[in-house]
Amino acid sequence: MELAVDIVGGVLLAGGSIFLLIGGIGLLRMPDLYSRIHPAGITDTAGAGLILLGLLVFAGPTLVAVKLLLIFAIIFFTSPTSGHATARAALAAGLRPLLGRDMNKPADGGDKPSKP
Amino acid sequence: MKHHRVLRIISKMLIPYIMLFALYVQFHGDFGPGGGFQAGVILASALILYGLIFGIDAAADVMPGWVLIRIIAAGVLIYGGVGVATMMMGGEYLNYSVLAAEQVAGQHLGILVIEFGVGTTVAAAMVGIFFAFAQRGSEDDD
Amino acid sequence: MMDIDSLYALLLPATVAIPLLGAVLIAVVGDSPNQRETITLVTAGTLFITVLALAFPFQLGSVPHVTLAVPIPALPILLRIEPLGLTFACVASGLWILNSLYSIGYMRGNKEPHQTRFYICFALALGSTMGVAFAGNMFTLFIFYEMLSLSTYPLVTHHQDAESRRAGRTYLGLLMGTSIGLMLLAMMLTWATAGTTEFKPGGILNGRVPESIGAILLLLYMYGIGKAAIMPVHRWLPAAMVAPTPVSALLHAVAVVKTGVFTVLKVSVYIFGVDYLNRLWSTDVILYIAAFSLLAASIVAMRQDNLKRRLAYSTVSQLAYVVVGAMLASSAGVMGAGLQIVMHAFGKITLFFCAGAIYTAAHKTLISQMDGLGRTMPWTMTAFAVGALSVIGLPPLGGSWAKFFLFLGAVEADKLVLVAVLSVSTLLNVFYLLGPVLRAFFRPLPADAPTGRHEAPVASVVPLCLTAFGCLLLFFFAGSLYDALLPITEGK
Amino acid sequence: MFAATAIAILLTMAMALARAFIGPTVFDRVLAVNTFGTKTVLLIAVVGFLMGRPAFLDIALLYALLNFIGNIAVLKFVKYGDLGVLTAEVVRARGGKRR
Amino acid sequence: MLLLSHYNYWIAFILLLVGLYIVVSRGNLVKKLVGLNVFQAAVFLFYISMGKIIGGTAPIAEPGFTVYSNPLPHVLILTAIVVGVATTALGLAIVVRINEAYGTIEEDELDERDEPGS
Amino acid sequence: MTNQADASPEPAPGVQGWRVVVLVVVLGGLWLLLSGFFQPLLLALGAASVLFCTLAAWRLGILDGEAQSFQHLWRAVRYTPWLLLEIMKSSIDVAKLTLAPSLPINPVLFPARASQDSDLGQVIYANSITLTPGTISIDLEPGSILVHAITETGAADIESGEMDRRVTWMVDS
Amino acid sequence: MIAEWLAMPALAPVVTQLPALQVVIPLLAAPLIIVVGHARLAWALALLAALAAFACAIGLLFLVLANGPISYALGGWAPPWGIEYRVDLINAFMLLIVAGSGAIILVYAPRSVDSEIARPRQTMFYALFTLCLTGLLGILITGDAFNVFVFLEISSLSMYALIALGRDRRALTAAFRYLVMGTIGATFYLIGVGLMYIMTGTLNLADLAERLPMVTDPRPVYAAFGFLIVGLALKAALFPLHLWLPNAYAYAPSVVSAFVAATATKVSVYLIMRVIFTVFGREEVFGDLAIGYGLLLPAAVAIVLASLSAIFEQNVKRLLAYSSVAQIGYIVTGLTLATTTGLTAAILHLFNHALMKGALFCALGAIVYRVGSARLTSLAGLGWQMPYTSAAFVLTGLSLIGVPLTGGFVSKWYLVQAAIEYQMWWLVATILIGSLLSVVYVWRVVEVLYLQEPPAGRPPVQEAPLSLLLPTAVLALANVYFGVETSMPLTVASRGALSLLGLGE
Ligand code: NA
Ligand code: NA
């Protein structure tokens, strides 16, 4: 049983960690704000979710599990809200997203409001 | 930001639970230092979130400045009141042991009330600081 | 029942309190001239009587003294009678009566503003002077010395214009600067080394303070007593001439400079003691500085056309006589110095009264304008002549005794340079003090001047005649003064 | 295992921090800081387990909340220049003065 | 070796200098406050790290732990942080009012604007 | 300028008794979960805390159907696993994308149909979109949501309308 | 008589609590004032609290005089583990000064505050004032190094806020600069405390004193000492760390200027004294650490340079502020000499300077109340129009100079004696030069008051109202009273000096 916990929990933690790192890389690699929100989202959803799940496995049915679930719930509610609010504010401020094939142009050069 | 539907609805959902969490930290704070501080900050954050979304004026309607400042004061009075109580009961200032028949119980009671005072003051002070900056420009200050 | 000594002891603080009380009363009645002046005169009279009353027990050999407070352990505020102080108090309080009388005439005659303040400060100055006179230790003397500076400051700046403000700055700057910077330091050193600042016959430093330090102390004291106007700290005195004439009289004769030389004498006799003084190298230094001061001031005085300024420099010169006497550190010197304080007071007050009277009656301030004044103001100019002769030191006037003892001291000490200086100075005195007299009596009036008698108000003329008469009397009654002062020369 | 996870979290945080420095827009920085914040929550939780002190979870919970509210506040500040709700038009209509 | 053994103090010390440098070198009042916060944070760090016992854990009472970090520095620093927050809040409040009164929060401009009218 | 597009009528604030009761129950349960202590003092404090929170929520005016919509709880529970699965799938997609050396992205911006009647429904849909990596909702307009997708595949997923249907089912029926 | 009352058994429950009450009463009064929320009531409460604190201070002083030092264990935790309130002669005396200043300035406050601070802010003003008083009293009474920090910041924060309430916009910049400097000072102090804690594991001042000598490595001890002294010197405005002070005093509301000038820097100097003599010990500091000159030189420079600055100042509040910097120089000079005489002088001057600056700023506040400005030019001719206020100013000015029969003389006397004992002639000269310079700056004001015509077009100015005049007069006359009847301050100061030097009380 203990071994199973270790294995399942470890795998979950490892998976979460990988998602986190990939998200972090994406945050650096993506060309503009809007495309960066996507990998940032991975870290909050898949990354955070798997890690919390892993911890949950280790915690077992205790008070700790309740708190882990609560943290999960809070991230689940607030992360998309934050991402959405950021994107919306950027759009409202006139930041033009790079679309389609013009990705290779200098990023974030948009200075005119260009809401399609 | 009231018309920001996502923020509005998510915040409305969260606020009651944030407040409950604040009170949970408040009353379970005796296992670590500064439970009252944390609780106060969390409680304040609930109202601050409300103010951010629904506007400072709406938040100030719920918690007007004159109430806020009195709550700050009341918190300090609660804190000091415990001390006065211990003095009245023949102990030194803030010597909680004299508060109850049993020393440990007295200490628990004393800490609980003290932390409550701290939490109250911190919460109100944080909201007050938020108002003080957020309200700038919306009132004539002469 | 109180014994007689403690009763007399009460009179000591009374000499300070009476003028202060007078000042308060004057302040209360405020701008009512008659009441104000009545109070002034009554206060002056009361004070004089009080001082005289103090002379009695002293004659009988008792030494009333009283401790007012002890702000710092071994540093009490102490009042005590001794011959020099008593003499000084008698002269000051006596002359105050005349000065008050004279002031009334002068101030009314010239319609001076701020008269209430004038009388208040006058009274305060007198109270301070009494404190100086009866100070039982250097600390007490210092306090009243400073009080005197402060209370005379409003008198100097009486006219409240730019010039008097400037003069006031010089006045207070030099007096407080030297007293705080040097005298206070000297006193602190005295206290630190001798453990007391009490005035004791024979001095307190002897045997307690090595002569090397004593010599420095002497320099500190002598230059710390700015009111003695030893060159180069004499500049406040001519500057203060902007004040109304009664103030000048107060400064020169009654209170301020007299306080200065009185302090010099007290310090010399009761802090250092004649014997100790004789062993200090700086005694001679001060002596010759004073001698130089004496001569230089005379020369400067000769070049002044403004009568009051000439008198001021004359004062600088005459004060140096006192310092010379003290620094001779011999019986004759000390006696000469003591007499000089009294004699000069009478002589110089007469001269200032006359200057004021001339200003009041003829509105003249320059000596070159005084031609023929002897005819229109015979009383005044006669008194002026008497005062001048006394200051010069010619018999049969009081001043001659002082000069005699000073010459005697110089000769005894074998200081021939000093003898020469004193002689030359006397000659110079003759020139610059008798010059105006000769002009007034032997030159014709200017053509455009009004002829006929035109004296100052009686309130002014009577005092100046009285002081002139005093100069004369002092010549004949110098014996009792000599007797009174004798103890201080004997170091007892 | 927890330690490895913590290191992964720290690396992610470092990358977020790098993005916060690079920007280039203020919104990129907001995004990066927000990401940094949620990773802090995870870090606190994992470190709690690492040290055998799951009581740290209360702090993680608190941090998650504050991170969200802080993010909203920053966005609002970026948008309006202050935390107030009054837009320039409203102030002008009221006849008030405003920087 | 000696330097490394006290690395926590050195970090605090460097932070301290950085904060002080910001306070002194920046003309913007808000940046000054930021510097002040860094400066204070350095001291908090110093306290917390000195309270750390090797192998100890955070001073929250829980059954099963016997070696805690010395709790006192934590208590102290909690208090100090509260003081620091209050200071920052007050400082910011004053800056806001300075901005309202002067229209700027740059130190040199403030001095300029006070000169003529003084 | 965003406000114009977003301007929808204010939700009618209707405080219904049963919502209050449910909120009290939920809060109370949460307290017990968090606390784990059942001493009388802490229970009393918990009761007081729940009461305080409920009163505060009422005073803040957030006790309406929009936020405390407990009637959808059961359907939400059924929706969530599907959403989580979607999230995992998209996460892997975007992860591959990120790691590909050529970074083969092709961002598109398009309005997605939102068939929910209520603000609540639209918000849930919008957040679901954002939670799913590869797509983010940028703006809410009546009947549609402006979406930014990092590839055309992600866009196609949304445009297929399955998520829209599921959210509408959850909230609006 | 007071001693007998204090010994009455019926009063025992109160008397044993006096050390706590000293701080708790004003501490609780501050929030109570806010709860009450009415300007006049706020003032009444503040005054009551200050009077109560004053009474406590008197009681404590008598207790200490009769029975020696008092120790009070806060929360019942015995020292050195808990926070100890420890009252000995010196801090009992300081408590008396601070509480007394607070009480008398609060009597003075309402009229002045009415004219300088808008009504809605007055409640906050009194609350802050009371809080500031609390902080200062707390610093004095506590025997715990960290607790000192807390009270230091309570008083400082409320002081910044109080200063920012000034009418002139420069009050804001002054408050900000004070805040930055003050915070740096406090943080330095905190570092010093931390270092001492690392070395000794205690925060109790008395306990520190016992354990510090056992520390083998001297470097952290030096570092701790340096941080403590620099931090406190910043708070005490010791030259050249005084730059925050002039504007802070000048643009604060008059009441605040008076209170802060009378108390705040002095409390910091007291702390310096404690650190040097109680914690580290005279031998350690002046023997091993050899910092005598490190403090003495700045103090001496302060005396001269700050007095010179005062001379060229056109704003009388700033003039007095610079004078304060100079006076701090005197006090620090006294304590650096570290002899009985020197310390006596320092403690005496702490007391006398509080009286002086209290009176001067009160008189000036009364003038500002009537003419609305503290610029030198606007004081012209007031000597005759506000005779009593002006007289109070002049009288106290004399004390500042150090004229005999005033308090200032006594302290300077001892200071010079201390310098003479060391045969430090340059120091003697410096002190006397400082006095001469103070003659100049005091006299500049006197001249303007009495010898200049009022500016044309200014309507006649009335004498200040009684509520301003009376406290001013009491303070001014206290300067004279304690210049003549010096036994109380002198006894306390000399016994305090002995105990600081470890020569017994
Ligand atoms: Na997404
Ligand atoms: Na001075």
Image (cartoon, coloured by chain):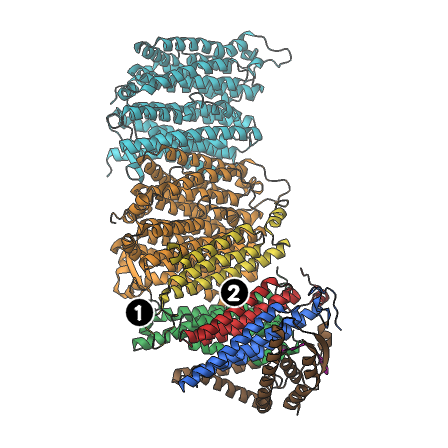
Residue at x-position 63% and y-position 82%: F128
What is the drawing colour of chain B? green
What is the drawing colour of chain A? blue
Q: Where residue C305 sits in the image (x, y, percent)?
A: 55, 15
Task: Single out the mark in the foreground, 1 or 2.
Answer: 1
Calculate the distance from the C-alpha at mark 1 to the C-alpha at mark 2: 34 Å
- Please give the letter of the chain rendered in brown: F
- Report if residue G470 is visible in the image: no
Find out if the beta carbon at label 2 lies less than 8 Å from the nearest ligand 2 atom. no
- Please give the letter of the chain rendered in yellow: E
What is the drawing colour of chain C? cyan
User: Is C486 rendered above or below residue D9?
Assistant: above
Range of residues picked out in magenta: F133-145
Residue F72 within the segment the image draws in magenta = no
Q: Where residue C146 sits in the image (x, y, percent)?
A: 41, 32
What is the drawing colour of chain D? red
> Which residue is label 2 attached to?
G38
Q: Closer to the camera, G250 or C228? A: G250
Furthest-top residue in this view: C442
What is the drawing colour of chain G? orange
> Which residue is label 1 attached to?
B91
